[in-house]
Image (cartoon, rainbow, N blue to C red):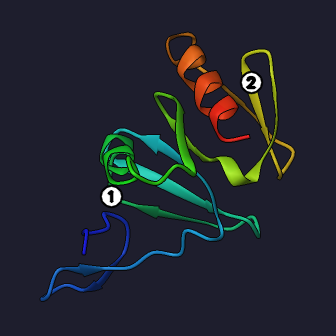
Amino acid sequence: MKKDPIQRKNKRENQWEIDLEHTVLFLGNKNYSLKYFADGSFKMFACTLKRLEEYFSTDKRFIRISKSCLINRLYLMRKEHNQIKMVDGKFYQISRRRLKEVERKLEKFR
């Protein structure tokens, strides 16, 4: 079982657990990330987005759209130019460097 970098279940056994069903997106700030849930709540934890992106590399739900944002595409409403609109109505900027890759991933999973 792959270790999840987000939520420790048991510190001694170094086991992890997470609820991805209701995770809308992750916003990163240096060594910390905010995990936003579908109900509007969020949780802060000590983990970089790079580490999360590596962990979710086989999970096609999550797409890195910028240096500070990793989205769950299941909660995506639409893409407008270089922005993503999520179900909460907020827009998130897609970085120029990642734009083509994001478009390719969104087309692939429609």
Disc 2, SS: strand
> Where on the picture, by quarter, is residue 74?
bottom right
Residue 21 rendering spot, x and y as whole percentages:
62, 71
Q: Residue at x 47, y 62 (%)?
A: 44
Residue 81 rendering spot, x and y as whole percentages:
79, 15
The answer to whether 55 is drawn above or below residue 99 in the figure is: below
The answer to whether 72 is drawn above or below residue 106 in the figure is: below
> Where on the picture, by quarter, is residue 106?
top right
The residue sitting at the top extreme is 96
Residues 10 and 45: in front is: 10
Tag count: 2
Residue 53 rendering spot, x and y as whole percentages:
38, 44
Q: Quadrant of the N terminus?
A: bottom left
According to the picture, the residue beneath numbered tag 1 turns out to be: 46
Disc 1, SS: loop
Tell me the crowding category of disc 1: few under 14, some 14 to 19, or many 20 or more residues within 10 angstroms, Cα based.
some
Tell me the crowding category of disc 2: few under 14, some 14 to 19, or many 20 or more residues within 10 angstroms, Cα based.
some
Callout 1, which amino acid? Ala
Callout 2, which amino acid? Gln
Front position among marks 1 and 2: 2
